[in-house]
Image (tube, rainbow, N blue to C red):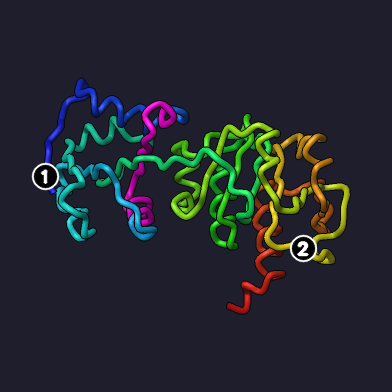
Amino acid sequence: MSTEPISSRDNPWAKKCRSLAQDSAAYRKVRQVWLEGDHLCRALLVRGRLPAVVVVTASRPHVADGWGLPPEVRRVVVADRLMAWISGLESPPPVACLFDLPRADEVLPAAPTVLLDRLQDPGNVGSILRSAAAFGFTQVVALKGTAALWAPKVLRAGMGAHFGLHLVEGVEVADLDRLTLPWIATSSHQGQWLHESVLPWPCAWLLGHEGQGVSDELMLRARHHVRIVQPGGEESLNVAAAAAICLHASAVSVGFARL
């Protein structure tokens, strides 16, 4: 694995990395994402994927030596101060990766799916991706208006879940006609209680905007509507918390808990 040293902020490649690390939409132009830290980089490798570039700091040049990367993976050594300039984190890590995004432009008709309707908070989106991967869902589809799925904050909140999911974003409502699964819509005020519901599998869970919920148009297309019992009396749950409860309920109903 060849090594290239870079120390200047004027280097065009370093400028590209900084943009990917700090601009939530930059990845859409170059079809690459910046993965910061050992955990995200190793999560990529665990899923059988390879980075295009491994970036290490001059003070820790051997941090990725044990990863078993093939010779064709480029390695760049950057000055510590340059990593701090590139990074979007308060405490920059000694290692990062550049990953070439896979093409995922079409909705898979029968994959267990989570539909995101205009969710705005990157932390919520990343947390939902993590729950989806944990509970046996293989596809997340984001309608237009949803936070960018590969944005740096979403990647950090997802903790590596991205690499086990088929992710499609920027979707129009009409594109959802490809789905052949029954939809289940979450609501804070209507539908069956989740714990009393017979949940279909596979299915598509529909999760809506943090303040407005699922749009009326999409609610009408859902075959099932459920709500979560809240004996404490709160008006509603955070959407990421609600998603974890609902997706876990699906996993239990299909018998994953006995595997």
Among the 4 quarters of the image, the one containing residue 215: top right
**Residue 199 image offset from top left, x and y in percent:** 77, 63
In the image, 224: left or right of 28? right
Q: Identity of the amino acid at label 2?
A: Leu
**Residue 33 image offset from top left, x and y in percent:** 38, 38
Task: Provide the residue designation for mark 2.
Answer: 199
- Which residue is depicted at the point 72% across and 69% down? 253
Q: Secondary structure at mark 2?
A: loop
Note whether 78 is above or below 60 in the view shown: above
**For marks 2 and 1 on the same chain, the one whose residue lies earlier in the sequence:** 1
Q: Secondary structure at mark 1?
A: loop
Q: For the magenta stretch, what is the residue range?
A: 26-44
- Crowding near pointer 2: few (<14 within 10 Å), some, many (20+)? many
Residue farthest to the top, as pictured: 10
- Along the line of sight, the residue nearer the viewer: 102 or 121: 102
Note whether 237 is above or below 27 in the view shown: below
Note whether 22 is above or below 1 in the view shown: above
How far apart are the alpha carbons under marks 2 and 1?
Answer: 52 Å
- Along the line of sight, the residue nearer the viewer: 10 or 73: 73
Among the 4 quarters of the image, the one containing residue 17: top left
**Residue 135 image offset from top left, x and y in percent:** 59, 62
Q: Identity of the amino acid at label 1?
A: Ser
Residue 81 on the magenta span: no
- Which residue is depicted at the point 47% across and 55% down? 164
Quadrant assignment for the C terminus: bottom right
**Residue 15 image offset from top left, x and y in percent:** 28, 25
- Which residue is depicted at the point 84% across and 66% down? 196
- Along the line of sight, the residue nearer the viewer: 119 or 204: 204
Task: Provide the residue designation for mark 1.
Answer: 2
- Which residue is depicted at the point 77% across and 49% down? 186
**Residue 87: mark:** none
